[in-house]
Image: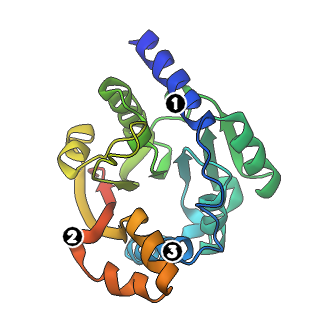
């Protein structure tokens, strides 16, 4: 199993290395900032319903990338010393370290080996990480690790796409039935978000306001924001 995990981790790094996204994910693009703001609104609404205060919550993000999500959580009120980010890729890790406060913990490497203490986190967050893992076994290992880190009553915050991209063999959708397999003890609440990105790029060339029009059609949304509650 360890060998399979090591092979998959190496494959993920190789797949990311050959991507050339250009400015596709730039926040200056109208479809990108609208996708991001939609997700942030939905996540803030969920956090507002949780007991306690952001400054007291502890959160670890799996696949923190360049640190953008952690920056938003700091703006929400999380204390930097209560935040931790885990990133597999050195370049992204270095970018996150440059922009985040020193008190934010950052760990480089395999998240399943990150050494987060069991039952220490109020939240574990992942955004489009599981769709980049093509091995079922490695997905399950990571899900098990995330579940161990959660306190009783804590929750996994999940954002990922649920449909396959026929143009990109390096990723695969994670439908809700798979999410329930990964976290069988979790109480799941979910909502569909995010206009299909290829369509979003197309319609926003016509006019940025077209995003809202097309995104009002539920079956054109390709991602899910889910909260997976751990029993008390």
Front-most of residues 143 and 206: 206
Q: Which residue is mark 3?
A: 31
Front-most of residues 54 and 43: 43
Badge 2 marks a residue whose secondary structure is helix
13 left or right of 198 in image: right
Badge 3 marks a residue whose secondary structure is helix
Q: Please tell me the numbered disc located at residue 12.
A: 1
> Which quadrant does the N terminus fall into?
top left
Snapshot quadrant of residue 42: bottom left
Badge 1 marks a residue whose secondary structure is helix
Q: Residue furthest left?
A: 177
Q: Residue at x 57, y 37 (%)?
A: 16
Distance Cα–Cα, label 2 vs label 1: 29 Å
Front-most of residues 223 and 145: 223
> How dense is the environment of label 3, judged by Cα within 10 Å: few (below 14), some, or many (20 and up)?
many
Query: Where is residue 40 shown, x and y percent of the image?
Result: 49, 73
Query: Where is residue 159 shown, x and y percent of the image?
Result: 40, 57
Q: Which residue is mark 2?
A: 219
Q: Earlier in the sequence, mark 2 or mark 3?
A: 3
Q: Residue at x 45, y 19 (%)?
A: 5
Q: Is residue 72 above or below residue 150?
A: below
Query: Where is residue 96 shown, x and y percent of the image?
Result: 73, 50
Q: Residue at x 58, y 41 (%)?
A: 19
Snapshot quadrant of residue 81: bottom right
Residue depth check, mark 1 versus mark 3: number of the one nearer the observer:
3
Residue 117 showing in the rendered view: yes
4 left or right of 10 in image: left
Q: Please tell me the numbered disc located at residue 143.
A: none
Q: Earlier in the sequence, mark 2 or mark 1?
A: 1
């Amino acid at each position: 199993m360890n060998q399979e995990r090591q092979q998959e981790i190496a494959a993920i790094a190789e797949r990311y290395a050959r991507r050339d996204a250009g400015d596709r994910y730039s926040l200056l693009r109208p479809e990108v900032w609208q996708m991001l703001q939609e997700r942030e609104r939905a996540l803030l609404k969920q956090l507002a319903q949780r007991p306690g205060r952001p400054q007291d919550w502890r959160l670890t993000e799996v696949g923190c990338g360049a640190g953008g999500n952690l920056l938003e959580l700091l703006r929400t009120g999380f204390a930097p010393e209560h935040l931790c980010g885990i990133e597999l890729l050195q370049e992204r890790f270095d970018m996150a370290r440059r922009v985040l406060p020193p008190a934010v913990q950052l760990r480089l490497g395999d998240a399943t080996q990150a050494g987060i203490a069991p039952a220490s986190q109020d939240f574990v967050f992942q955004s489009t990480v599981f769709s980049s893992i093509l091995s079922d076994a490695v997905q399950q290992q990571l899900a098990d690790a995330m579940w161990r880190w959660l306190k009783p009553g804590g929750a996994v915050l999940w954002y990922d796409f649920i449909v396959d991209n026929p143009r990109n063999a390096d990723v695969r959708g994670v439908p809700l039935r798979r999410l329930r397999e990964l976290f069988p003890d979790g109480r799941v609440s979910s909502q569909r978000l995010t206009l299909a990105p290829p369509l979003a790029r197309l319609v926003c060339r016509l006019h940025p306001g077209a995003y809202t029009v097309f995104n009002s059609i539920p079956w054109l949304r390709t991602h899910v924001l889910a909260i997976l509650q751990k029993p008390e």
